[in-house]
Amino acid sequence: MIAETISLGILSLPSVLAAIGIVPYAPLILASPSPTPPFCPTLTSRSGLILIIGLGLVATYTGYVIGQFKLAHPFIHNMADAGFVLLGRPGREIFGAAQLLLLVFIMGSHILTFEIMLNTLSSHGTCTIIFGIVGLVVCYLCTLPRKLGDVSHLAIASFISIIAAVVVTMAAVGTEKPGGGHIDATMQASLADAFLPVTNIVFAYAGHVAFFSFISELKRPEEYYKSLFLLQGVDTAMYLLVAGVIYAYAGENVTSPALGSSAPLFQKIAYGLAIPTIVVAGVINGHVAAKYIYVRMYRGTDMMSKKTFKSYGTWALISLLLWIVAWIIAEAIPVFNDLLGLISSLFSSWFTYGLSGLFWLHLHRGRWFESPGRIAMTVLNSVVVLIGTLIVSIDPFLASWHWHRLALILECGFVLTAQQMALGLYASGLGIQADSASGGGSFSCADNSKS
């Protein structure tokens, strides 16, 4: 879980502080060359560090609810199964498609990082598209083992590699001080410039989509909570440390991924050390995506456990097709922050935040207002739904009188929630447009390492 979660997300966080500042700031200045969408005339900036802590705490709670939902419905292996519990067959198809798309986009972000890594190590030795194909082949070969346990053995190497890479980068920027010791505690930014970094923080906590699959692999699922608390404690602490230290010394010169913030030699060392996490964390997402399709094809048949040419061939073909699509995404959106922002806007806020609120409401349907404590939890989980995306469960319990009371809470935030998704897509779209106009567009051989 740590290897899957603490990977690419941590590398974008120093640039988040460079964009929105370290400490709380008052109203955001929206007067900028970027147009302001009519649906959101004002926005308030918050501290980057406080956002990392706050979103981390909410992600811990939503991960806890996922564990409760899994233990209450042991047959759930993925978000599609959870969608079936909430909405029946339509829910399975909707949630399954969204989960698959999220995983494939994350796989694409790993191929993109693989390209940046090879461009840095080789000083742009060849066309970036070739580096992307190399990343596709490497990740595909590592996805071929059908058991997640076989892949998980590499998780320790992945975690050590990301720790080593960021430590080298922190030491390098601390020695070189490329920012000249100047940092901005508060920032004034346009709507798009401020909202895109927020989506990058959301991406850093985007591991929840795979939690059902991880729990299914455990011999004792009830011990999942220990793993969850360890994960969230470690990742939040690392996010704060790495983001704060690198930005403090690199200042406005911080790059994303952050491994490129130091001198060329240290960039090469850091990216070399990061190779295991760039590959392994992507492979884990690829494995979960391939397993979802494989289980949908063969659930209830002996192909689930058989070791035959057909079973291995099917798995290999599914994995290959998924990585090809991921490579296309990486080539189509070749800027790291833009791709992460798009992923968060489209999917991560659903799976990390919003859906867990619906899980809790479903688990406690008919008992939302039976006590003051339960009312408080009902309000809390309604707010969690609003943090992500307002997805109303078409379940028989909606017809009960309790629903009409809960609806008052949910409907109050409907417009706000719709704006949140629209803002994320708006900010990501502007970022992609701006970066494409500045050179190195889609399917380009240009160097995307910024080294």
Image (spheres, rainbow, N blue to C red):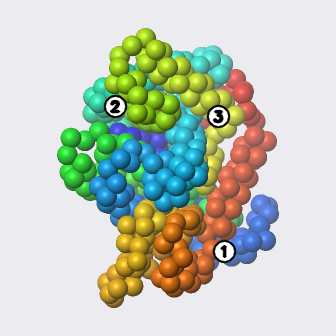
Question: Which amino acid is tagged 3?
Answer: Ile
- In what quadrant of the picture does the C terminus appear? top right
Q: Which residue, given by chain and number where applicable, does mark 1 sit on?
A: 415
Residue closest to the eye, 432 or 293 = 293
Callout 2: helix, strand or loop?
helix
Question: Which amino acid is tagged 2?
Answer: Leu
Task: Please state the total of marks drawn on the protein image.
Answer: 3
The answer to whether 314 is drawn above or below residue 160 in the figure is: above
- Determine the residue positioned at 31% across, 46% down: 215
Q: Which residue, given by chain and number where applicable, does mark 3 sit on?
A: 329
The answer to whether 443 is drawn above or below residue 288 in the figure is: above
The answer to whether 125 is drawn above or below residue 381 in the figure is: above
Disc with the residue nearer the chain's start (1 vs 3): 3
Question: Tag 3: Cα neighbours inside 10 Å, few (<14), some, or many (≥20)?
Answer: many
- Determine the residue positioned at 75% across, 40% down: 436
- In what quadrant of the picture does the N terminus appear? top left
Question: Tag 1: Cα neighbours inside 10 Å, few (<14), some, or many (≥20)?
Answer: few
Q: Position of residue 201 (x, y in %)?
A: 49, 56
Question: Which amino acid is tagged 1?
Answer: Val
Q: Position of residue 144 (x, y in %)?
A: 42, 20
Structural distance between the alpha carbons of marks 1 and 3 = 30 Å
Residue closest to the eye, 92 or 148 = 92
Q: Which residue, given by chain and number where applicable, does mark 2 sit on?
A: 148
Residue closest to the eye, 305 or 436 = 305
Q: Is 368 on the left-hand or right-hand side of 86?
A: left
Q: Are marks 1 and 2 in contact (CB under 8 Å)?
A: no
